[in-house]
Amino acid sequence: MTGAAIRTVDPRPTPLKARRLGIDTHQEAVVYMRQDCPVCRSEGFAAHARVQIAGPGGVVVATLEVVTSDLLDHDEAGLSEAAWRRLGVRQGDDLLVTHPPALESLSHVRAKIYGQRLGRAALRMIVDDIANGRYADVHLAAFVTAGAGHALDVEEMVALTEAMVAAGRRLDWGDRPVADKHSVGGLPGNRTTPIVVAIVAACGLTIPKTSSRAITSPAGTADTMETLAPVDLDLTAMRRVVDKEGGCLVWGGAVDLSPADDVLIRVERALDLDSEGQLVASVLSKKIAAGATHVLIDMPVGPTAKVRSQPEADRLTGALRAVGASAGLQLRVVQTDGTQPVGSGIGPALEARDVVRVLQNAPDASPALRTKSVVLAGALLELLGHAAAGAGQATADAVLRDGRAWRKFAAICAAQGGLREPPRAAYTHPVVATRSGRVERIDNRVLARIAKLAGAPSDKAAGLELHTPLGGRVDRGQPLFTLHAETRGALAYALEYAGRHADVIQIGADA
Amino acid sequence: MTGAAIRTVDPRPTPLKARRLGIDTHQEAVVYMRQDCPVCRSEGFAAHARVQIAGPGGVVVATLEVVTSDLLDHDEAGLSEAAWRRLGVRQGDDLLVTHPPALESLSHVRAKIYGQRLGRAALRMIVDDIANGRYADVHLAAFVTAGAGHALDVEEMVALTEAMVAAGRRLDWGDRPVADKHSVGGLPGNRTTPIVVAIVAACGLTIPKTSSRAITSPAGTADTMETLAPVDLDLTAMRRVVDKEGGCLVWGGAVDLSPADDVLIRVERALDLDSEGQLVASVLSKKIAAGATHVLIDMPVGPTAKVRSQPEADRLTGALRAVGASAGLQLRVVQTDGTQPVGSGIGPALEARDVVRVLQNAPDASPALRTKSVVLAGALLELLGHAAAGAGQATADAVLRDGRAWRKFAAICAAQGGLREPPRAAYTHPVVATRSGRVERIDNRVLARIAKLAGAPSDKAAGLELHTPLGGRVDRGQPLFTLHAETRGALAYALEYAGRHADVIQIGADA
């Protein structure tokens, strides 16, 4: 039936020499090639094209940037850090650059955009291509957009969760119950995790906690923990800590759990899009991949938290429960107060100090952080069957009060490489009340932004310390919060922004 | 009601020196800064962040790539070609790099994603941000995705069209009727435009035609015309040609009509998403901005054309008519045969030869290209009132036959800088039939891809020449098409692909 006969001529692509340019393009693999190099000429590549690069040890799809200057030689292909890392090449290795295979999974993304449901196989293909770096930013954004809001039903969420687990490594802890917790987020200074892990592990239970670094917040749990102990452990080291102490508090990035999730999260944040389905799959895929069997979800609800209203919270709770049940997880959601930060510090070292003060039963420990940690740990102890229903908080409280939680925490830090003292900022600056009255409203988002402008999370000591919680009374001229920064420039920048957002903390008249 | 008092400290951002790196990132503005430069440190910028760059002559928003090597000095900010061009800076100029202002228009994109209708003001804000380069790829993809399929109603299409016109320059030709034409595309070798312009201008009418270069096709009208005459004219030069000859055939890129459209088209192609609303706005905004009053739309319909079915064609025709009417355009849509290429050449120079053969009434001129050009020119002459209903084709045919169209075409080329001979390829290679029979089906998309792999459109002489139309009879061993390439490598590459897609031309048994 078909007709064209071809005398085959071998296309013999010309290899180029790998050169590390030392350009950090975050997750995106980028290759730099001269406009007049033999490959660009023969393959007809133009700037921003997607190309496939094959090295001695692997293949990646990258975005091409075309060099019109002498930055590179004709026979060189420059690589961004992400491309260099994923190809695992050495300087001068031969690279073959060709057109990438067609992205078949995009037809499923298009089907979703046009309103169709996606099945298991389709979501598996999409997630596999994402985890393997085959999607450019425009493809990622299209998939995130197509799944925004309530576009995924429970079956699709289950399939997406499974696909995200399958795309990465999955930890196996044998038959014992394995605890995990997650906070839905949006609340600065909500650093209950180290305290909950310490309490649960002190009870002899297993809680191998992997945490993320901050993406858009002033501190992730991994950033905070890093000021107290090394967190950059590989899987073998992590297992050693958990086998010895029952728990750990490490950075999840080195362990390669649900790698597609990290890629999608970046795009969701850039678009500031909420997607129920992707949130559920993101949270639960990480827990399932980490080998958890019993999962506690902390869901702060408040107008400037991630979950802003009670109907939204209830709907999300239902979706988490349904997908968790389908995956065989024991799961409990605790809806918590999301109207103000928990603890007084915001920023890695400042939050670490809050954590240590609670664990050490210090007189200046934050009551809110202590209470919330006890509530969450208690719920987890009940879920694990370690405490009877209603008795979890009392157990957690006792373990914290008598120093067992602090000793366990110190032991975990020692096993991870040594407990250390969080750094202190070189510059501090108080921001004071312009009137007397009661604190009526705190904008978590603006507060987080101020802490980031002060340098958090990359400057570990940077951030801010809140002095008065909601409902507290302040006098005119009394400090509302203190900025901490490692450089004068960052301090100035944060102050300038705070000045333009003086309503970050609203003070009302006395009752 | 609010409370934070600030002693303002001037943030005094540190200027960096502009350095042109000679990196072509296509449309995207990219800035390269050292990780340890004072600005990255004080502002807390991370790789892939969006930043604002202010130079002596302008401001752009760019994507940050962080340099961890000695590619740059501490006090330098490297710029991609797009950033360099848009900032209009010189080597060593001072640049201030800061956080960009919030993208307020993204809230409207999110509203559309969540299914709301967008009003005039919202679409104006979005398009303005796009035209000014403030959207990253993820933002563009989210907007394109949100408008995919039939997501925009007629009112939204009208508003989007107006916003796209308003974001660029708009040409004014006074009170005379101004003709324009557009082909919806997807059909290779469909190069009727130069012939239609020549016929219409030869009738004494005004047709200032701006055309695009190829984005994903083997040739755009501007690429084809460039092998015959200069097309890179600025507005003044274009006006001079139109005032003298009544018509022109220039590249639209230098004239800055509907700049948001070029940005959106790139993303739509990368996603291979069809969007009725964006197609209508794209086509009509360019025509309105070019000052057209009478617009003819050629809509090829066929299974491998852009418009694949009759219902789709009728729906799109209705939308074009409604939006055109709302904009005050006289508009006519002609649905044409989209089952096979028009003319025999595919690729800039090969299509140019087809055009010239028709204009010169050569014995080997393509009958299909001639007929289609006469049909379209006739419809346009009727729309302009130059011919009575039903008499347009006869008028167009006469103008072509007696040489007036060719003389007008040659005069336009001369006015644009001089008529020239299209180049010929160094390498040609026939692809022959493996059986005898009739040509039953031609896959336009695969044919276009083969021509591109042969080097078109960047290699002007590259492409392919079809020897037998649909329904034509071939003998085994007789050439079906001939590949043309400027390099041996490109020829080999196109042959290899053609070998894997031997069903590009299907041959059936004789009846």
Image: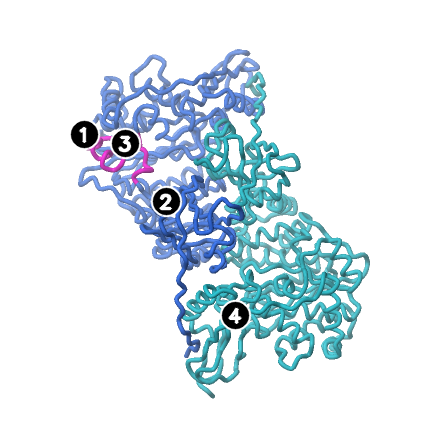
Chain colours: A cyan, B blue
Viewer-nearest of labels 2 and 3?
A: 2
Q: Is residue A12 visible?
A: yes
Residue that appears at 62% across and 43% down: A86
Does B242 lie within the magenta span? yes
Q: Whole-percent x and y of residue B302?
A: 46, 31
Residue B119 higher or lower than B356, as above or below = below
> Separation of disc 2 and disc 3 at Cα?
50 Å
Does mark 4 fall on the same chain as mark 2? no
- Badge 3, how many Cα within 10 Å: few under 14, some, many 20+? many
Mark 3–mark 4 distance (CA, rounded to whole Å): 71 Å
Query: Which residue carries the number 3 mark?
Result: B380
Element carrying mark 1: helix
Verify whether residue B380 appears in magenta.
no
Indicate which disc, 2 or 1, sits on the residue closer to the N terminus: 2
Looking at the rendered structure, whether the residues under marks 3 and 4 are on a common chain is answered as no
Q: Which residue is mark 4?
A: A484
* Circle 3 or circle 4, nearest the eye: 4
Which quarter of the rendering shows the N terminus of chain B?
bottom left
Q: Amino acid at mark 2?
A: Gln
Going by the numbered disc 3, the residue's amino acid type is: Leu
Instruction: Report in which chain the residue with disc 2 lies.
Output: B
Check the residue under mark 3 and report the chain it is in.
Answer: B
Indicate the chain on which mark 4 is placed: A
Q: Count residues near mark 2 (Cα–Cα under 10 Å), then give few for <14, some for 14-19, many for 20+.
A: few
Nearer-the-camera pick, B243 or B1: B1
Residue sitting farthest toward the bottom: A511
Nearest the eye: B305 or A502: A502
